[in-house]
Image: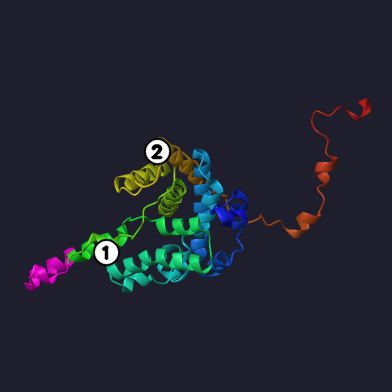
Amino acid sequence: MLENLFGITTDISWLEASDLNHPLLRRMTIEAPGTYHHSLVVANLAEAAAEAIGANATLCRVCAYFHDVGKLVKPEYFTENMSFERNPHDDLAPTMSALIIIAHVKEGVDLALKHRLNQRVLDIVQEHHGTSLVRYFYQRALQQHEDARAGGKIMKLREDDIPEVKEESFRYSGPKPQTKESAIVSLADTVESASRSLEKPTPQKIEALVNELIDERISDRQLDDCDLTLGELKVIADRFRFTLLSMLHSRIAYPKAGPKPVVPRDEALRPDVMVATRKPETAPPVSAA
């Protein structure tokens, strides 16, 4: 009653909200299992980083569970849920693919409102991509535009007939992260997704990846509206590296069991009498016993 009256959420309420039996999370385990696993790893990364800088770690964990809930609408269009048989984006233009990817934020907010999730969860669902660029499909659109221009020269078409690629069409609508917790979940999301593309991850590769992604978010001005300091970002990067290294560690390749030697049946059953009764060369004479 006091929480509703004053508009606050205590740590006890956040602990109750961290129950993985929530209907949306149960749906995710069945309809989007890749996204569910991704969300669990993001939650571990975000919680560890929040603890390191004194932010609300439980809030980060709960919000990370739900940050990609909008992918339940079209789960098969996201990499972690795709089957090995086909990629649905192969049949779509880059602009349409980008629209589907960007729409998962709005659809996540709609699902969160429908299930009456906490307002802080809604905020992080809406802010976790900020106004960042859907870079893969943007680069793909630029490449198709260059190919169209080259073909247009051959066909003697005017350049005005070839539509320009607008960067705004490939950016999320925002807003940018407004709090430390929102920025931590945002960074954990992009770091976890990119770490899946590492081949034979090593401490050096993980460190370079984390630093590159955080620097990219800073240069893109995605962290301007939150109050994270450069010192806190350094601590967050260190915690991300440590957590990723513990999760992506390699294992020893166990040797395969070779074929067992075939022992003839008679030799396997016959006791070796000579071994049991033969005296060693250094044994004392019988008379000395």
Mark 1 Cα-neighbour bin, 10 Å: few <14, some 14–19, many ≥20: some
User: Extreme front residue here?
Assistant: 5
Magenta stretch: dominant secondary structure: helix
What residue is rendered at 91% in x and 30% in y? 286
- Does residue 114 appear left or right of residue 161 in this picture? right
Secondary structure under tag 2 reads loop
Coordinates of residue 121 in the picture (x, y in percent): 49, 57
Q: Earlier in the sequence, mark 2 or mark 1?
A: 1
Q: Nearer the viewer, residue 66 or 144?
A: 66
Coordinates of residue 222 in the picture (x, y in percent): 34, 49
User: Which label number is shown at residue 169?
Assistant: 1
Q: Nearer the viewer, residue 184 or 204?
A: 184
- Does residue 34 appear left or right of residue 204 in this picture? right
Quadrant in the picture for the C terminus = top right
What residue is rendered at 37% in x and 42% in y? 211
Pointer 2: what residue? 229
Coordinates of residue 256 in the picture (x, y in percent): 58, 53
User: Which label number is shown at residue 264?
Assistant: none
Mark 2 Cα-neighbour bin, 10 Å: few <14, some 14–19, many ≥20: few
- Contact between marks 2 and 1 (CB within 8 A): the answer is no
Coordinates of residue 124 in the picture (x, y in percent): 45, 55
Three-letter residue code for mark 2? Thr
- Does residue 24 appear left or right of residue 285 in this picture? left
Residue 167 visible in the picture: yes
What residue is rendered at 47% in x and 44% in y? 240
Label total for image: 2
Res 232 → quadrant: top left
Answer whether residue 219 is magenta in the image.
Answer: no
Residue numbers of the magenta segment:
146-163
